[in-house]
Image (cartoon, rainbow, N blue to C red):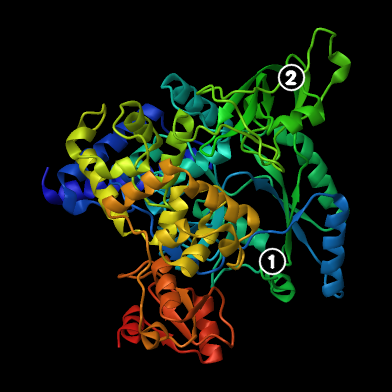
Amino acid sequence: MNKDKIKKRILFLQENLHIHNHKYYALAQPEISDFEYDQLLNELIDLENNNPEFKDTNSPTQRVGNDISKEFNQVIHKYPMLSLGNSYSIEEITDFETRIKKTLPDEDIEFVCELKYDGVAISLTYIDGFLQQAITRGDGIQGDDVTNNVKTIKSIPIKLNSNDFPSNFEIRGEILFPHEGFNELNKERESAGEALFANPRNAAAGTLKMQKSSIVAKRPLDCYLYYVLGENLQYKSHYENLLQAKSWGFKVPEHIKVCKSIDEIFEYINYWDKERKNLPFDIDGVVIKVNSFKHQKDLGFTAKSPRWAIAYKFKAEQEKTKLLSIDYQVGRTGAITPVANLEPVQLAGTTVKRASLHNSDQIKLLDIRVNDFVFVEKGGEIIPKIVGVDKSLRTNEIQEVKFISHCPECNTKLIRVEGEAKHYCPNDTGCPPQIKGRIEHFISRKAMNIGAAEATVEALVDSGLIKDSADLYSLTKESVLSLERFAEKSANNLIESIKNSKQIPFSRVLFAIGIRYVGETVAKTIVKELKTIDNIINSSTEQLIEIEEIGERIAQSIVDYFKDAKNIDFINKLKIAGVQLEVEEINNSDFEDKLNAQTFVISGTFEKYSRDELKELISKYGGKNTGSISAKTNFLLAGENIGPSKLEKVKKLNIPIITENDFIKMIEE
């Protein structure tokens, strides 16, 4: 077959597979068998692999994914992804409708009721009919670019199948893990000895953030799209644009209803409160939106949410089951958490076998006993919780629970700090879960950002290669290669990641060390004031309390930590390794104040520095960083993909816009 014929065959296969994808996943009306589909897809994969000049980023083969691993880029949302105000009672929905009608007294208001999907919010951008970018909600202003992973989700069209769409628009929705696929995934993980996902939402979120899209492609994620945004939409109402989006090839929810009265809204809510159990995926409420775009514009927004929409949250589901036994888990700080083992019960679409009991006080408060029949609730909890006991079914043989007195992992006598609910194991250097937990915290993204999985930490500790986080810096490629499942490339990557962590700023190192109560913000505050680890070690409780926002509990925890000789040895090992344990002192006050208390807002992505690093530089050179633009803003520090709303606002306020290079000149001159 010559190149011309190969190209024509590739284009033919791509076009037909796009059509069959839409009919199978969006319309549920397949025209060919799975076998026939796979035959066509495999032919296309072979043709593209053997003729790379004809590869297309919008080809159906992109749904297979790839093994390229990379960090996700942060992208500013063109339109902020605001959250909805939540309501938990019919009265609050009535108040919402009353406010709408009071604001627009002379208008006929229509509402659109939709299901509130319990998944991961996603925003998709289409240009000229092709999927250009997929961004997670993130913080609402910016999110992660997960385009490669989203392209593997078969219910999301890579290419639209009509010609009446705008040249550039966004559509938003929710990525879900249907119950059937979720249960199958957990069975596979259980067979492989891997940790189970707690619920479909967590499974969807975890899958979407995986670094290898080839793995994402093997998981049956689904997606419903429910909100179209753009400058040139054909219709003037939310509902009509959704129906049109369906004709373009999107999987638009079928369970949408236009309501013209509060009674119709209540009818919709009451129906789905009962019927949700029969859905193949999780929902946790209903969303009510004003239908007309004009009315939406008139109603506007608060700082956090639109005034024209509200979410009604269903009450958490409850089921009754038998408590079979209680396990005691040890966290990285030594905190003991009792967990109930239950007779399996279906709850909110998943099989629940375990539930958190929180602490000994909670056990006493609810008078929970082994072999009791208990009420289990799953209202936004990652681990379901026990909320009550059916004491009418309790027999005389059922005895009170005696909370353990010694650590279940190392048999050390437990302690309980006055004023706290938790029991603790004080053997922080000899208790295996604490050792592993502290190392996992140390290497986490917000701490030292070392690329190692939980299984890697476990293997390193169990093999005796490391006993604490500082031992990571003594690892060699050869020692890592001695572990199972480590090849040359993965060993090199781990060693390089450990080496790079030596450049992590001191405030993050202090957070990584894992002193109780010293979180990210507290670590930054202390480092800004005391500058070096030695200053912190030598500080008294009284001196620490004098630092703004540092209370007695935090101060005492820091002092107690450095009283322990083992912790001082640990710090000395970090010093020898070359980890950053002080901030650079700048003696020239003119140099320190180069930015002269001017206020900066950062927006976009940058080449030389991350946003966090730019914030640190602004603070270091005497400037201020804020998240929102106001008349007090002196400069907008702008990178690529700057948000249009910020751009419009700075132009309106006549605020200077500077680039990353402009900023570097300001601090270097």
Task: Tell me the quadrant of the picture where the N terminus can be found.
Answer: top left
**Along the line of sight, which residue is nearer the eye, 163 or 468?**
468
**Residue ID for mark 2:** 401
Query: On the image, which quarter does residue 503 sit in?
Result: bottom left
Compared to 18, does 218 lie above or below? above
Q: Is residue 228 visible?
A: yes
**Along the line of sight, which residue is nearer the eye, 26 or 551?**
551
Q: Is residue 161 visible?
A: no
Q: Residue at x 51, y 44 (%)?
A: 205
Q: Amino acid at mark 1?
A: Pro
**Residue ID for mark 1:** 306
Q: CA distance from mark 2 to mark 1?
A: 49 Å
Q: Amino acid at mark 2?
A: Val
**Along the line of sight, which residue is nearer the eye, 135 or 243?**
135
Helix, strand or loop at label 2? It is: loop
Side (left or right) of 616 relative to 246: left
Compared to 170, does 147 lie above or below? above
Helix, strand or loop at label 1? It is: loop
Badge 1: how crowded within 10 Å, few (<14), some, or many (20+)? some
Residue 120 location (% of width, % of height): 55, 48
Q: Residue furthest top?
A: 397
Residue 177 location (% of width, % of height): 54, 37
Query: On the image, which quarter does residue 42 sit in?
Result: top left
